[in-house]
Amino acid sequence: MPLKRYKKYVSLLMFTAPAFLLYAVFLLIPTLGGMFYSFTDWNGLNKSYHFVGFANFAEALGEDSDFVHSLWFTLKYVVFMVVLQNAIALLLAVLIETRTRSKGFFRTVFFMPNMISIIISSFMWTFVFTQVLPQIAEKTALAFLDQSWIGNPSVSFYSILIVSLWNGVGYMLIIYLAALQGVPQHLKEAAVIDGASPFQRFLHVTVPMITHAITICFFLTLNGAFKVFEVVYGLTGGGPGRSTQVITLNIYEEAFSNNFRYGYASAKSVILFVMILIITFIQISVMKKREVEA
Amino acid sequence: MKKSWKSVLATVLAAALLAGCGANGGNSGGADSEAAASGSGGSGEAKNVTLKVFIGAPRFKEHFDKFIADFAAKEKAEKNINVSVQLEMPNPDNASQILKTRLASNDAPDIFALHAVNEIPSFYKAGYLEDLSDQPFVGKLLDSVKPSVTIDGKVVAVPLETLSWGYLYNKKIFADLVLTPPQTLTEMKAVVEKLKANNITPFLLSYKEAWIPQLFLPLAVGAIVNTENPDFIERMNKNEGSFSEMKAMFDIIDLVNANGTDKALEVGGDDGAAAFANGKAAMWVQGPWYAETILSANPDFEFGVAPLPINDNPDATMINLSTSTSLAVSPASKNKEVALDFINYVLDDKASNAFYQALKFNPVAKVHTFETYPWVNDAMAYVKEGKAYQDPSMPQSVKDEVGKGLQAYFAGQIGQDDVLSALDKAWKAFNKVNK
């Protein structure tokens, strides 16, 4: 018997070895390296560097007002994204689920933007925001379209949201669709017989039955929203000034322009990592409890 | 059945993994064997040298390939050395990144390109630049270019691309309205008024990319440092100065911002070049490095380069001279002799002229006698009158900061003092990090 168990582990190890090797070389080791550098003042060029303990972390959270601003801006973005992305995706999924023949068509249409790389879609939207919308506003009477969509800091937050949602909703939609199709028919019918209204049916039958999908989608959106980079980089570049700068952009700037403070930028990355870790951990543990089995 | 699937899958995975490794190995192996093959092609006693050259400008690949082939022929003829050059030309966006990684991992290329004004100080400090002061090419450099590749009295790089700039103006609009480039701020205001009276927008604004509003800083600081405040940069480096001394720069910035095109924060450099080429505005605070983009938008367009007036002292209205791409030699190079030969060949009496002309660079040495572009001549006319200064050496972080600051200032989010104090802070941070 022990021999068989041993064999099982060997085959398991052999199957995961290629993936794990690549994962270790390209992700695990660099990550640990980054954590190591976060305690130094390395500038990415010098051969020598010094250990500075937690000074980088203290500076990032204490003195660096730009970093703190980008932190709050990212949190605001995360809240909007998590709520809107899931709400819209779920709504669309429910609506598509009511269709019979055109289901495939709508599914494809809404998923399509997800297949375009985010950086390309943000460049596309830059064109839409700066050229197309003002033109439409000029030709029609829709004056509100003639905004400074990416130049005005209070409007550009919503421009960033629009592009992120346009790009990101499709993926969540597919997950929700799959979950909706897994809701047992007999429970719905039982609810109909008990005289539940469509809204009640949705709230008390469908939602509990798709909680596992909601957990996954919240996890994905939360994670993705914290790490947002391309959309902001492509649309506003964090500008004007630093008004739409997200954490990742702040880190990028710290490491690759400014004073090339790699160590300091690594410390900021570690802060971001810990933040995502804690928040997603809480989210998962809270939502896991609410999942039910049919 | 299940078992056979497993083995098939395992085989496929293993094959894929091997193929991946194989592809990588094949690439580097190919380069090596190629170098070896071309080396062994020469005569028996000839020395074989492989020179690694790193230049982050793929758009010049053809020119460099040809130039390197000429160089190899010359080395073979004169010194009987078979030189094979491994030319690495990554994308300019991440070239500097790759170069730093290579230097930090002791895998330095023999010759590499770097930005003279921005990168020489930090590279020099880290000990990655060979002292080239006693090389023959140094004597050929123009006096106006030499300071930009000199640090601590040592010449450390050979300049390739140099820039002389201020702002661009539309020659046709200026000729139609009988205007000449203004020499003082008051004259500039008169020009602006006259343009407005003729329904022409005076300035093109393109502030989407932070580096464009940033251009005001080198122009203003350069002019002020070279007239009334000569020790500003030194004092800033010692934490003794403050940008409040430079508050006068907002005179010209406000003038430009108040008389510019709409939606400035949505227009990037390329869009701006197209708009300028199509006569949307008479002037653009920008350098002639956009010449190619401007001319591709409108091939018949005529523009000139003029110095930007920042106050009412006509002597402060000067052209900014700067050097960007330059070639340096690594002190760790194993083939230093050949590397130095190459560096000198860049300014060779015979070969250099055609090379710089083909690259469309400005003349940097006495051996360059080719005909230059009209806008270069415009700028050179000022330079010859002595109305030019070296691009002031400011930390990159300060330049980044001013770009963002002026964007926010334009958007009305912050005031002049906020911009200036942010600059002070950025410079202090630079001093702290680089002490």
Image (cartoon, grey):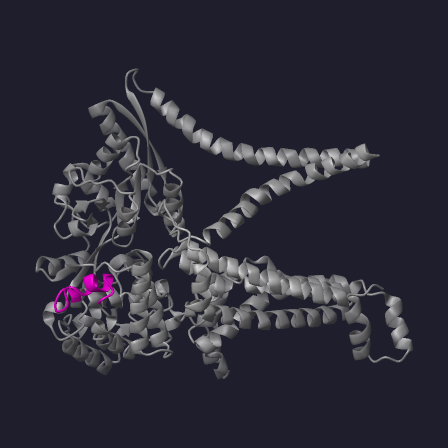
Drawn side of residue B184 relative to residue A53, left or right: left
Drawn side of residue A44 relative to residue B239, left or right: right
Residue A208: percent from left, percent from top? 79, 69
Q: Is residue A121 above or below residue B130?
A: below
Q: In this view, does A53 lie above or below A73?
A: above
Q: In which quadrant will I find the C terminus of chain B? A: bottom left
Relative depth, front residue between B407 and B423 = B423
Residue A98: percent from left, percent from top? 77, 70
* Residue at (24, 27) in percent of width and height: B75
* Residue at (49, 84) in percent of width and height: A141
Residue B162: percent from left, percent from top? 22, 52
- Residues shaded magenta: B225-240
Say whether residue A234 is visible. no
* Residue at (55, 34) in percent of width and height: B21
Q: In this view, does A270 lie above or below B63?
A: below
Say whether residue B218 is visible. yes
Q: In which quadrant will I find the N terminus of chain B? A: top right
Q: Residue furthest left?
A: B385
Question: What is the number of callouts on the image?
Answer: 0
Is residue B239 shown in magenta? Answer: yes
Relative depth, front residue between B104 and B324 = B104
Is residue A91 shown in magenta? Answer: no
Drawn side of residue B381 relative to residue B252, left or right: left
Residue B376: percent from left, percent from top? 18, 56
Relative depth, front residue between B102 and B163 = B102
